[in-house]
């Protein structure tokens, strides 16, 4: 995985970046829009964090 791909994954779960486009991470790690609709399933954030943890070692 290259630096650009790692940066993209980090931004995909960054609360500030998500807030700028009206998205947030729900209580179970799901990505939700301003109306509370799920964009990605529960565990989305956790899965990305695990990938990043492996890649950054």
Image (cartoon, rainbow, N blue to C red):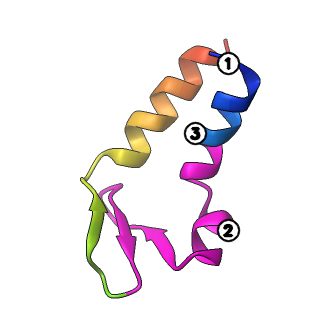
Local crowd size for mark 1, using a 10 Å CA cut-off: few (<14), some (14–19), many (≥20): few
In this view, the residue farthest toward the right is 3
Q: Residue at 26% of width from left, 68% of height from top?
A: 38
Q: Secondary structure at mark 3?
A: helix
- Any mark on residue 16, and which? 2
Q: Nearer the viewer, mark 2 or mark 3?
A: 3
The residue lying at 36 percent from left, 55 percent from top is 29
The C terminus appears in which quarter of the rendering? top right
What is the span of residues highlighted in magenta in the rendered image?
Answer: 9-34
Give the answer, above or below, for where 7 lies relative to 18.
Answer: above
User: Is 43 displayed left or right of 47 in the figure?
Assistant: left
| Residue behind mark 1 | 56
Q: Secondary structure at mark 1?
A: loop
Element type where label 2 sits in the image? helix
Tell me where residue 49 appears, x and y as whole percent: 50, 35
Mark 2 or 1, nearer chain start = 2
Q: Quadrant of residue 40?
A: bottom left
Q: Residues within 10 Å of mark 3 (few under 14, many from 20)?
A: some
Please tell me whether residue 45 is drawn above or below residue 40 in the rendered image: above
Answer few, some or many: residues within 10 Å of disc 2's Cα (few below 14, many 20 plus, some between 14 and 19): few
CA gap between label 2 and label 3 equals: 14 Å
User: Which mark, residue 9?
Assistant: 3
Residue farthest to the bottom, as pictured: 35
């Amino acid at each position: 995985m290259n630096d650009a791909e790692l940066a993209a994954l980090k931004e995909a779960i960054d609360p500030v970046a998500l807030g700028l486009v009206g998205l947030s991470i729900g209580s179970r790690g799901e990505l939700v829009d301003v109306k509370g609709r799920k964009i990605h399933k529960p565990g989305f954030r956790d899965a990305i964090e695990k990938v990043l943890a492996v890649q950054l070692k």
